[in-house]
Image (cartoon, rainbow, N blue to C red):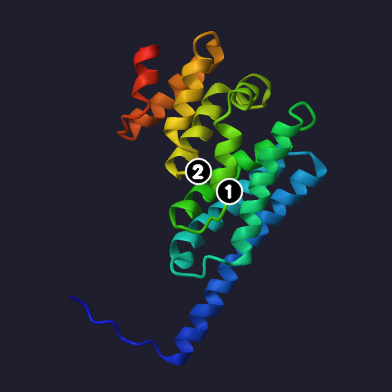
């Protein structure tokens, strides 16, 4: 049993400043997302920049965000931009793949924030988007992602409780009957689940294996 010692006033002020500055890394990531979405271009350089900003955010989230006010505008802005990127792809799949590429790159941050209890409505919105036969088919057949990338995206979203694996399984149970591409994505998803010791989507496994 440990006894908590009250922090000196100056330490509390310094801590607040530290948290404020760390939230800036998430704001920077959101701005990078916004630029890609607005310009409709996501080059290799843009992706590399997103990766670098994301690494900084990942370090800061686990260290500084715990216990912070969940209504922080910075988190809400990030959440809204990721959902917007995903929505814009499915609204006009052939127009630009850039927003989807950007959203996929930062989805693990959104999943982490959701697991920490920060997100408001994005999980429901993303589930509506991704647990939809037409949209999953579009993502697999008409998107810029290879099968393993689609599988990884869905795995990350399941891990972060952004989408329900049961709802997604219902979609795949229908898709795999006559879509070989959907089967490949399902197998990719299984490999990720197995490597993480998960035994989910049992009905889909029985149908395919």
Secondary structure beneath dot 1 equals: helix
Q: Which residue is drawn at 45% across and 86% down?
A: 11
Q: In this view, does 196 lie above or below 208?
A: below
Q: Name which residue lies at 69% across and 42% down.
A: 85
In the image, residue 208 sits, relative to residue 194, either above or below, namely above
Q: Residue 15 carries which label?
A: none
**Residue 47 % position (x, y):** 66, 42
7 or 113, nearer to the observer: 113
Residue drawn at x 67%, y 36% as measured from the top left: 100
Q: Where is residue 84 in the image (x, y as percent from the top left)?
A: 69, 45
The extreme left residue here reads: 1
User: How packed is label 2: few (under 14 Cα within 10 Å), some, or many (20 or more)?
Assistant: many
Nearer-the-camera pick, 3 or 199 = 199
Q: Mark 1 points at which residue?
A: 122
The residues tagged by marks 2 and 1 sit, at their Cα atoms, a distance apart of 8 Å
Residue 173 in picture, x, y percent from top left: 46, 18
Marked residue nearer the N-terminal end (2 or 1): 1
Q: Are marks 2 and 1 in contact (CB under 8 Å)?
A: yes
- Residue 113: percent from the left, percent from the top? 50, 54
The C terminus, quarter of image:
top left
The answer to which quarter of the image holds residue 36 is top right
Quick one: 68 or 20, which is closer to the camera?
68
Q: In this view, does 186 lie above or below 122?
A: above
Which one is nearer the viewer's eye here, 34 or 176? Answer: 176
Mark 2 highlights which residue?
162
Element under label 2? loop
């Amino acid at each position: 049993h440990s006894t908590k010692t009250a922090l000196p006033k100056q330490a509390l002020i310094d801590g607040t400043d530290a948290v404020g500055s760390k939230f800036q890394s998430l704001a920077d990531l959101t701005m990078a997302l916004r630029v890609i979405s607005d310009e409709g271009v996501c080059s290799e350089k843009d992706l590399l920049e997103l990766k670098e900003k994301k690494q900084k955010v990942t370090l800061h989230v686990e260290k500084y965000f715990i216990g912070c006010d969940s209504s922080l505008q910075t988190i809400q802005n990030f959440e809204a931009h990721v959902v917007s990127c995903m929505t814009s792809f499915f609204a006009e799949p052939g127009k630009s793949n850039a927003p989807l590429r950007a959203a996929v790159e930062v989805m693990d941050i959104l999943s982490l924030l959701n697991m920490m209890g920060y997100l408001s409505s994005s999980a429901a919105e993303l589930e509506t988007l991704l647990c939809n036969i037409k949209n999953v088919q579009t993502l697999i057949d008409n998107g810029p992602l290879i099968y393993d990338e689609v599988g990884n995206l869905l795995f990350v979203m399941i891990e972060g409780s952004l989408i329900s694996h049961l709802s997604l399984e219902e979609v795949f149970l229908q898709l795999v009957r006559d879509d070989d591409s959907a089967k490949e994505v399902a197998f990719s998803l299984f490999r990720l689940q197995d490597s993480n010791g998960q035994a989910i989507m049992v009905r889909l496994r029985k149908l395919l294996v």
